[in-house]
Image: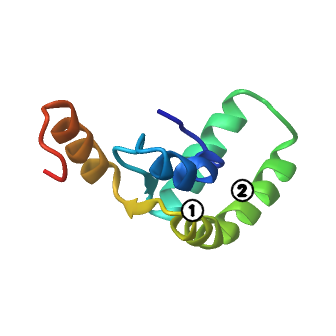
Amino acid sequence: MAEGIFAAEIVEECRRRGLLAGAYALRRPRGATFLRRLARDLAEQRKAPRVLVRRGVALLRAEPAVLRRQTGLGAEAARAREVLRQVAGLLAGHPHS
């Protein structure tokens, strides 16, 4: 299992080696992601609030391109609920449930 923005980098190699059960890129509401990230960063006092807002807006704008890149590398864009359903099916021995 790999997780994170760079996980899609290994999708093709895992597929080639027969090690890939599934590859997913989470598709979330961008505004909600922005607010969750901002709330977390403000609570942790990572940087000045103005810097956090600017960074958050930049990430908000970049998110569609990140998702396109991940799907271009072989990950399937899906909502979290769908990913959980797929993984539960894999664990139960039912691929593509």
**Along the line of sight, the residue nearer the viewer: 53 or 13:** 13
Residue 41 picture location, percent across and down: 70, 37
**Along the line of sight, the residue nearer the viewer: 88 or 20:** 20
**Along the line of sight, the residue nearer the viewer: 91 or 42:** 91
Left or right: residue 94 compared with residue 15 = left
> Could you tell me which secondary element the residue under label 2 belongs to?
helix
The scheme the figure's colours follow is rainbow
Can you tell which quarter of the image residue 77 is in?
bottom left
**Residue at the (62%, 65%) spot, across then down:** 63
Left or right: residue 82 compared with residue 37 = left
**Residue at the (59%, 45%) spot, across then down:** 7
Number of other residues with Cα within 10 Å of mark 1, as a class: few under 14, some 14 to 19, many 20 or more: many
**Residue at the (47%, 59%) spot, across then down:** 75
Amino acid carrying label 2: it is Gly
Q: Earlier in the sequence, mark 1 or mark 2?
A: 2
Can you tell which quarter of the image residue 20 is in?
top left
Q: Which residue is mark 1?
A: 70
Number of other residues with Cα within 10 Å of mark 2, as a class: few under 14, some 14 to 19, many 20 or more: some
Q: Which residue is mark 2?
A: 56
Residue 63, placed above or below residue 52: below
Q: Work out which residue is located at the far front of the displayed protein and give it.
A: 17
Residue 36, placed above or below residue 56: above
